[in-house]
Image (cartoon, grey):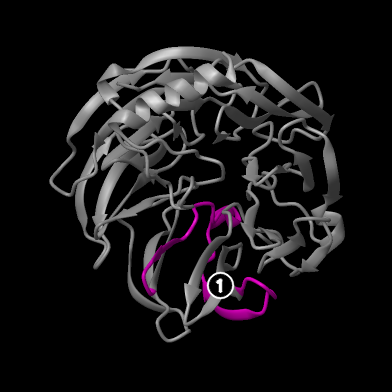
Amino acid sequence: MSKRVWCMMVVAIAVNGICDDWHTWRGPNANGISSETGWNPKSAKKLWTRELGVGYSTVSVKGDKLYTMGHEEGEDTVYCLDAGTGDKVWDYSYPCETGKYKGPRATPVVDGDNLYTVSRTGHVICFDAAFGKVKWKTDALDKTGNENIRWGISSSAVIEDDLLLLNIGDAGMALDKNSGKVEWKSKGKHSYASPVLFDHKGKRCAAIFSSPGLQIVEAKTGKEIASYDWVTKYDINGADPLIIEDKIFISSGYKHGAAMLDFSSGELKPVWENEVMHNQFSSGLYMDGYIYGIDGQTKGKGFLRCIAAKDGSEIWKMRIGFGSVIAADGKLIALGEDGTLYIAEATPEGYKELAKTSTGLEKLCWTPPVLANGIIYCRNDKGTLVAIDVRK
């Protein structure tokens, strides 16, 4: 598909709605929610399929380009594909260990003309996004003196001005995004969530959900501001924290549960804590006073659940198995681990299904779906990527 045709398609969607790229982990607003409107869940049809190699990276989409990662025969591969056809634009491979649950976990991030990727063993690479030329690369574990975690690095890069933040070390680290130089670092055991940026009393902060618990640091310097102990079995704090005004929601699996923490004073103080929501590593969403997320464990019982942010009480639940969820245009887009795509109203008035589609993917689908420019992209652990057209 030519770039001209792609642009015409995007314009066609825009006539009835708003298109939106999804160029970074957790989307354009870094909260799992897209600004895209005008798409039609009931018109879903498969557009194309591509084999990537094993792994769990989801996709980033900017314009007519899609970026993702996979692993095959001892090498990770970074892909740039045509978002409309799945055709390869460029790729880049490098040796990398597979580990248990094989392949890369982090998602490529587009920032201007650059693309940033992170491997499960700490390779951080900056590419020219258009042509795939390597601008710089570094080994984040080696540079910080930290050891890898049990299932490998999962933290996607998060861009803040000229910094690239990662959940490596017990309070994170930052690289210069233009050179790969370490700007600040921490020593200790990290975990699987990605950093979350927010503003507090005129200061730019990062919430780092690491092995010891939640760490709040100054984004520019890494200076530690506050912490809250939250140790989970296997050191898995994998779901990104949710920033809700002056409060922060955290949740973990393995029967740990969830908590709402008040940060208005600059200290982290519990508002409530319960076991209604267990986000093992699938990050939740906050919308209009309610939190939506996948409660449960992989390969077991799992529910799409809605809880009240004010007190953590359950509002409704729908059993879909383990999976992941994003949102757009007042709708939840959930991918179950069996490959079923569920689209429902994002409302506290109960589970209201709008569409249910088989993606054709086999287990295990743990990777979050992505909606970009009228297409939902879904992937399984074996590396099959499916593009589903939901344009009107």
State the residue at coordinates (31%, 29%): 15
State the residue at coordinates (65%, 47%): 112
| The C terminus - image quarter | top left
Q: Which residue is mark 1?
A: 205
Q: Tell me the quarter of the picture where residue 213 sits.
A: bottom right
- The magenta segment: 218-246
Please tell me which residue lies in front, 308 or 300.
308
Q: Examine the rendered structure and indicate whether residue 22 appears above or below residue 82.
A: below
Q: Examine the rendered structure and indicate whether residue 200 appears above or below residue 308.
A: below
Please tell me which residue lies in front, 147 or 116.
116
Q: Is residue 166 left or right of residue 204?
A: right
Instruction: Please state the horizontal and vertical placement of residue 343, each as a whole percent of the image.
Output: 29, 31
Q: Tell me the quarter of the picture where residue 180 sits.
A: bottom right
Q: Tell me the quarter of the picture where residue 257 sits.
A: bottom left
> Mark 1 falls on what kind of element?
strand
Instruction: Please state the horizontal and vertical placement of residue 258, each as a whole percent of the image.
Output: 38, 61
- Count neighbours of disc 1 (C-alpha within 10 A) and say few if under 14, some if 14 to 19, many if 20 or more: many
Three-letter residue code for mark 1: Cys
Instruction: Please state the horizontal and vertical placement of residue 170, each as a whole percent of the image.
Output: 67, 67
Q: Is 354 a magenta residue?
A: no
State the residue at coordinates (45%, 79%): 268
Q: How many marks?
A: 1
- In the rendered image, the residue lying farthest to the left is 349
State the residue at coordinates (19%, 46%): 347
Please tell me which residue lies in front, 15 or 182.
15
Q: Examine the rendered structure and indicate whether residue 40 appears above or below residue 333.
A: above
